[in-house]
């Protein structure tokens, strides 16, 4: 009699405590002695669930012991708490440093960041350049930007920048009422899905993708949307990316991305000329859902280079 071989993957949840008291909810998959740890940071109003498709495609590699995977919810998102510090993308970079120190304290690391998660990695590189080329051996930047998100008034970022601080404060004050109103149009509602599709997805996105993305975003709070918006507008690391020149970098962007259009990725390649740029056709901002295999292929290239100790000269 023959049977199916079942492989067991060690999976656990962890809480990363930051100096200001935030608790970052993390999921760790794979053996502690895996040769490389991949750490993934998600985007604005999302959670680590935005990486589910990528994680699923990496499952066999994790089971084979080729890599270890760490995903976490950014502060104020998912199951993570807020802490007592002013919300800035620089603070998210400091949070990522805590994740590395507490969950991947030794061995080579590959970082992946989607949207705000990519900005988080840039802030870490600016604040802790000594990590890059030593601990951090590779970086994947997905649908992200080094700055200048709001200068184009026709872009989604430019339109959101029109919300002035007083307006944001008023919206926050009425957050409970607004949350109730938001629940009147749940992710399953056609109007909700139409809005999400038009803003975040390309023409090839399936209904299932859009619904799943809408659910992830709907689970985020109005506070996450409002409090992080000014931080994203203030983000500018275009002159602070030298540390990323020390490691292989893979950059991904969809040709239909409305939040971080492809000009942002092209600007990154001007600063990081050794980086590999991938332009995905008929793809929007949610590239980790729309083209997960493309991202996985890039991550695995970085993992292979990290395992051999290769860095950019």
Image (tube, rainbow, N blue to C red):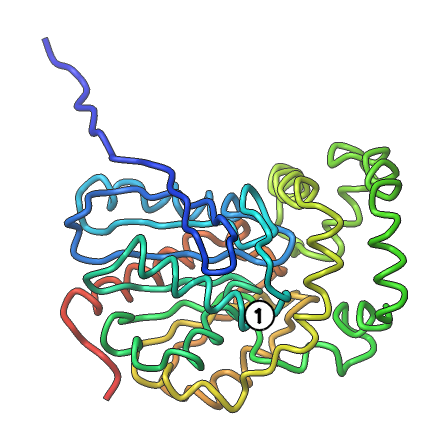
Q: Quadrant of the N terminus?
A: top left
Q: Which residue is depicted at the point 25% across and 42% down?
A: 30
Number of numbered discs overlaid on the protein picture:
1
Q: Which residue is depicted at the point 59% across and 63% down?
A: 85
Q: Position of residue 78 (x, y in %)?
A: 57, 44
Q: Which residue is depicted at the point 86% across and 44% down?
A: 178
Q: Position of residue 5 (x, y in %)?
A: 17, 23
The crowding category of the residue bearing disc 1, from other C-alpha atoms within 10 Å (few below 14, some 14 to 19, many at least 20), is many
Relative horizontal placement of residue 237, taking residue 129 as reference (left or right): right
Relative horizontal placement of residue 102, taking residue 25 as reference (left or right): left
Q: Quadrant of the C terminus?
A: bottom left
Q: On the image, which quarter does residue 90 sit in?
A: bottom right
Relative horizontal placement of residue 226, taking residue 264 as reference (left or right): right
Q: Which residue is depicted at the point 47% across and 75% down?
A: 122
Q: Position of residue 254 (x, y in %)?
A: 58, 65
- Given the current orientation, which residue lies at the most extreme left position? 1
Would you place residue 158 above or below residue 203 in this image? below
Would you place residue 29 above or below residue 35 in this image? above
Would you place residue 287 above or below residue 7 in this image? below
Question: Could you say whether the residue bearing mark 1 is in a helix, strand or loop?
Answer: helix
Q: Position of residue 46 (x, y in %)?
A: 60, 50
Q: On the image, which quarter does residue 287 sit in?
A: bottom right
In this figure, which residue is indicated by the disc labeled 1? Answer: 89
Relative horizontal placement of residue 204, taking residue 121 as reference (left or right): right
Q: Nearer the viewer, residue 127 or 11?
A: 127
């Amino acid at each position: 009699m023959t049977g199916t071989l079942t492989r067991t993957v060690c999976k656990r949840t962890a809480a990363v405590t930051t100096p200001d008291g935030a608790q970052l909810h993390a999921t760790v998959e794979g053996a502690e002695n895996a040769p490389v740890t991949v750490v993934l940071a998600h985007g604005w109003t999302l959670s680590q669930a935005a990486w589910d498709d990528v994680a699923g495609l990496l499952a066999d590699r994790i089971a084979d012991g080729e890599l270890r995977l760490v995903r976490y919810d950014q502060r104020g998102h998912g199951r993570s708490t807020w802490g007592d510090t002013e919300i800035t993308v620089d603070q998210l970079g400091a949070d990522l440093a805590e994740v590395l120190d507490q969950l991947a304290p030794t061995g080579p690391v590959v970082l992946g960041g989607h949207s705000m998660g990519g900005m988080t990695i840039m802030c870490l590189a600016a604040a802790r350049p000594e990590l890059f080329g030593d601990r951090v051996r590779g970086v994947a930047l997905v649908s992200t930007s080094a700055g200048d998100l709001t200068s184009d008034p026709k872009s989604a970022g430019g339109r959101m920048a029109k919300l002035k601080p007083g307006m944001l404060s008023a919206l926050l004050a009425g957050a409970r009422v607004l949350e109730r109103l938001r629940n009147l149009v749940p992710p399953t509602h056609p109007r909700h899905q139409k809005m999400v599709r038009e803003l975040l997805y390309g023409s090839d996105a399936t209904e299932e993708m859009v619904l799943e993305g809408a659910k992830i975003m709907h689970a985020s709070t109005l506070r996450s949307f409002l409090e992080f918006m000014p931080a994203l507008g203030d983000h500018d690391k275009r002159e602070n990316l030298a540390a990323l020149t020390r490691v292989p970098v893979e950059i991904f962007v969809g040709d239909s991305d409305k939040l971080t259009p492809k000009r942002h990725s092209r600007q990154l390649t001007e600063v990081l000329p050794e980086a590999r740029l991938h332009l995905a056709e008929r793809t929007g901002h949610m590239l980790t859902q729309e083209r997960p295999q493309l991202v996985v292929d890039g991550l695995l290239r970085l993992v292979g280079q990290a395992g051999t100790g290769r860095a950019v000269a």
